Amino acid sequence: MNISELEQSLKTVRILVVGDVMLDRYWFGSADRISPEAPVPVVRVSQTENRLGGAANVALNIVKQGAQVTLLSVRGEDQEGEELESLLRANGINSDFIIDKKLSTTIKTRVIARHQQLVRIDFENSPTHEVLDQTLERYSALLNDVDVIVFSDYGKGGLQHITQMISEAKKAGICTLVDPKGVDFEKYRGASYITPNKVELRDVIGPWNSEDELNEKVYSLRKNLELDGVLLTRSEEGMSLYQSENVSHFPTTAQEIYDVSGAGDTVIGIVAVLLASGCDIKQSVTYANRAAGIVVGKLGTATVNFSELFSQGD
């Protein structure tokens, strides 16, 4: 499939993203003095910006490739939730929100001066069980109209039913990708692929002293959880794809690492759209690795569009 054919194919791809959404707020300014009240910099804010975060950023990366995407999540009945929906609409993303009146929409506020993040301030709580049950019902109704499902787990409580969701998708023959969080990977049993980073993986399988030891531990994890594969994102070392008893390494393509915020969202989003378009897993990871190399060179939660991704010598 050439690039022109791929671009046309992506227009018919249908992806469902399920998970924790958040509003990423950026306060940009200058920090030229220290506060007299405490030994901290005083930031004079000159610009503010709201961006899609968490599962919403995954959806944004997908739609930037020209694919169709639906985002299923929970938000609060508040201004921040409305801002999220507005940003999603502006970017052509179909949002299917269950509104929880007891929930405050998750906000991550980053204060940045001279291109450096000084502090991050989080506002969050967890959705109620009743609302999560509604999400499961809605999920089941959406299964007939999707090619691939992405679960974006940020540990905010929105994926309490993920094990059942994966099971339903597997019965329907739908590929599932999981960006995991926490030490309980058992809940991801039966997924097609999981995409942990090194820290997330180490918390689950323990430390390793060599590549051979790492390989054996990941092979065991993959087999025990009945996964098709594990895609390990390794920062400056690129990525490693573990399938059955073999591993493929993908060296990083990043020219410089400016900000890693949201890079995992980009990786899983690109893999999802390319698998859905008919590419095999190694082709999909090759381009996802390239996409990650592009977004880490941008400030803040960022995306890569189709022309950026497929204009490098293709």
Image (spheres, rainbow, N blue to C red):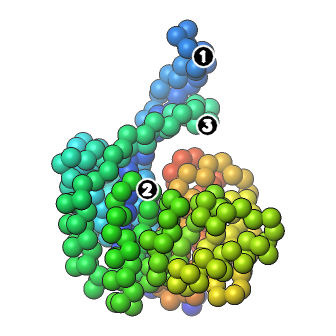
Which of label 3 and label 2 is nearer to you? Answer: 2
Which quadrant is the N terminus positioned in? bottom right
Which of label 2 and label 1 is nearer to you? Answer: 2
Circle 2: element type: loop
Eyeballing the image, is 20 above or below 67? above
Residue designated by label 2: 155
Q: In the rendered structure, which amino acid carries the disc numbered 2?
A: Gly
Which quadrant is the C terminus positioned in? bottom right
What residue is rendered at 53% in x and 79% in y?
A: 225
* Residue 292 location (% of width, % of height): 61, 63
Circle 1: element type: loop
Circle 3: element type: loop
* Residue 3 location (% of width, % of height): 57, 83
- C-beta proximity under 8 Å, tags 3 and 1: no
What residue is rendered at 55% in x and 8% in y?
A: 36
Q: In the rendered structure, which amino acid carries the disc numbered 3?
A: His
Residue designated by label 1: 39
- Gap in angstroms between the C-alphas marked 2 and 1: 32 Å
Pick out the residue farthest to the top.
36
Closer to the N terminus: mark 3 or mark 1?
Answer: 1
Front residue of 201 and 269 = 201
* Residue 49 location (% of width, % of height): 42, 40
* Residue 151 location (% of width, % of height): 42, 69
Residue designated by label 3: 115
Residue 82 is left or right of residue 117, and the answer is left
Q: In the rendered structure, which amino acid carries the disc numbered 1?
A: Pro
Closer to the N terminus: mark 2 or mark 1?
Answer: 1
Q: Is residue 134 visible?
A: yes
Which of the labelled discs sits on residue 204, or is there none? none
User: Around disc 3, counting alpha carbons within 10 Å, would you say few (fewer than 14), some (14 to 19), or many (20 or more)?
Assistant: some
